[in-house]
Amino acid sequence: MKIGVIQPDTLRQKVEDTVRRAIMSGLYLPGERLIERELCEDLGVSRASVREALRRLEAEKLVEIIPYKGPIVATISREEARQIYALRAVLEGYAAREFALKASDEMIEEFSQAAQELGRAAQNNSREEVLQAKSRLYDTMLGNCGNELVWEILRGLYSRINMLRATSLINPDRLPKSLEEIDTLVQAFRDRDAEKAQETASMHVMNACEVALRNLDSKAGLSGQKSS
């Protein structure tokens, strides 16, 4: 067996993944300019690789390319955030219900382990670790709910969902409540209580929505004060 030839897309994918993680972890903030020259220097890659990665992130609505200004980190409006959370509440509530009914005992235990991992990440106060653990949690539930279309729709929103998730989940007032809600969800899965699972998952999303919208309103207020 021969080692595979490295494809040109491999480097571009690595650049894309690195910039995506930086945006979703808050290293690059909404509205911040992404200077190609600096990205090239930081990542040690060509401008062509950076530009191709930015074009792909633009398609995910993580990056916006402004004429005569260049690429910036995209912002999410309050209304767009509200719509994303509303869709999430419906789809994730349904997914939780189906997971409670259809998931194997092994998958429920994997969800429980991911919840424990999330708790440890929260204790470390690491935004990146929390987001990674949260992603594993949802990958387990959505990937084993028996409805690939639900997972496909949410995966299409995955990057923007993580931007909003970072806004709400790391909030010191929100995080303990979020962990309690997830523990309730774990118990509903273990009890095979589909109605409780659906109710808890939907409530979990809408509670996060309230915090995220308050944070967006606060940032908008601060921005208005600076410009006045």
Image (cartoon, rainbow, N blue to C red):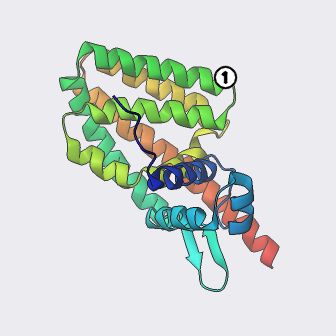
Q: Is residue 129 above or below residue 58?
A: above
Out of 126 and 167, give the one closest to the viewer: 126
- Figure quadrant of the N terminus: top left
For the image, the number of numbered tags is: 1
The residue at the far bottom in this view is 68
Measured as percent of width and height from the top left, residue 103 is found at 23, 23
Q: Is residue 184 above or below residue 38?
A: above
- Figure quadrant of the C terminus: bottom right
Residue shown at the point (46%, 28%) measured from the top left: 181
Residue shown at the point (57%, 22%) measured from the top left: 119
Out of 120 and 93, give the one closest to the viewer: 120
Is 92 displayed left or right of 25 in the figure?
A: left
Residue shown at the point (67%, 81%) measured from the top left: 69
Residue on which disc 1 sits: 123
In which image quadrant can residue 218 be found?
A: bottom right
Residue shown at the point (75%, 65%) measured from the top left: 222
Measured as percent of width and height from the top left, residue 77 is found at 53, 67
- How dense is the environment of label 1, judged by Cα within 10 Å: few (below 14), some, or many (20 and up)? few
In which image quadrant can residue 76 be found?
A: bottom right
Q: Is residue 200 visible?
A: no
In which image quadrant can residue 224 be found?
A: bottom right
Measured as percent of width and height from the top left, residue 54 is found at 55, 65
The residue at the far front in this view is 2
Out of 217 and 121, give the one closest to the viewer: 121
Q: Secondary structure at mark 1?
A: helix
Kind of residue at badge 1: Gln
Q: Is residue 106 above or below residue 29?
A: above
Measured as percent of width and height from the top left, residue 150 is found at 25, 46
